[in-house]
Image (cartoon, rainbow, N blue to C red):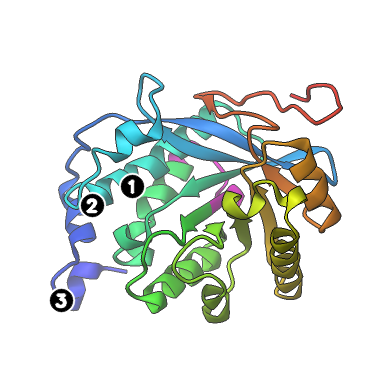
Amino acid sequence: MNISSTGETPPPGCRHCRDSEPLPFAISMAFQPIIDASSSAIFAYESLVRGTDGSGAKSILDQVTQANRYKFDQSCRVKAVELAAKLALPTYLSINFLPNAVYQPAACIRATLDAAQRFNFPTNRIIFEFTENESMVDKQHLRGIVLEYQKLGFKTAIDDFGAGYSGLGLLAEFQPDIIKVDMELIRDIHQSRARCAIVEGIVGICRKLDITVIAEGIERVEEYLTLRSLGVNLFQGYLFARPGFETLPDVHWPGRETVC
């Protein structure tokens, strides 16, 4: 698609692509595994933004402004693919993106496609996840992003599900491939009848809609075992591994030997 040939004024994201202004600060990535308890295997690694010295995400996110938001989103995608390829990541790669920084889905995905080709990373092993904590002004725009990414062979995920603006209303508009249940619903779930009922309901809805469920923020064995009993198979959290800066960390299974 040639955006400039439509005669319309290109959106800000298209101008940023064309002008290729560098991001005013440097970034790197850490990787945290998502484990599949049903097969004792690693399902994916989520890429998490870090400073080049390993400093936390907050130190980077505090420097993101409306002016550099688009470039930051694009740079994170490219850096995640670059490092995943360098580490020979053998699983899915989950990349966070900012829906409000995607102006035209087919155009804004170009840098990711180019990076995947340049670093020889398979696009069918990329998951794009967005958080529902980011207020969505236009649900139809978000729906368009998800459908475009799915059409291109990417998987899509809603992060922090159950903590944001739209909740189940998003699933009525469109269905991502994956939802990640927010850690606030997970914390101490083994001691909460209400949390158990809510998560069990989410799992049932997702099963009917062919959506995969990931429980994130797992810190205690009791949380893990309770979620397993509710039908959840995919997990992420400190119980299994902390993020590894520019590396793939070992995974610790409760009651088992360390698995690389």
Label 1 vs label 2, nearer the camera: 1
Disc nearer the start of the sequence (1/2): 2
Residue in front for this viewpoint, 33 or 236: 236
Q: Do the residues labelled 1 and 2 touch (CB within 8 Å)?
A: yes
- How many numbered circles does the render carry? 3
Q: Do the residues labelled 3 and 1 touch (CB within 8 Å)?
A: no
Left or right: 129 in relation to 19: right
Q: Where is residue 224 in the image (x, y as percent from the top left)?
A: 77, 43
Camera-side residue of 97 and 182? 182
Task: Report the residue marked by disc 3.
Answer: 8
| On screen, residue 92 above or below 100 | above
Which residue is identified by label 2?
Answer: 17
Figure check: 22 above or below 164: above
Q: How crowded is mark 1: few (under 14 residues within 10 Å), some or many (20 or more)?
A: many
Q: Toward the viewer: 161 or 30?
A: 161
Horizontally, residue 193 falls left or right of residue 118, namely: right
Residue 22 magenta = no
Percent position of residue 76, x then y: 38, 41
Disc 1 marks a residue whose amino acid type is Gln
In this orientation, which residue lies closer to the viewer: 161 or 155?
A: 161
The residue shown at (53%, 70%) is 167
The numbered disc on residue 74 is 1
Q: What stretch is highlighted in magenta?
A: 117-127
What is the C-alpha distance between the residues marked 3 and 1?
Answer: 23 Å
Q: Where is residue 164 in the image (x, y as percent from the top left)?
A: 47, 63
Report the residue at 38% width, 60% height from top.
Answer: 134
Dot 2 falls on a residue whose secondary structure is helix
Q: Which amino acid does label 3 sit on?
A: Glu
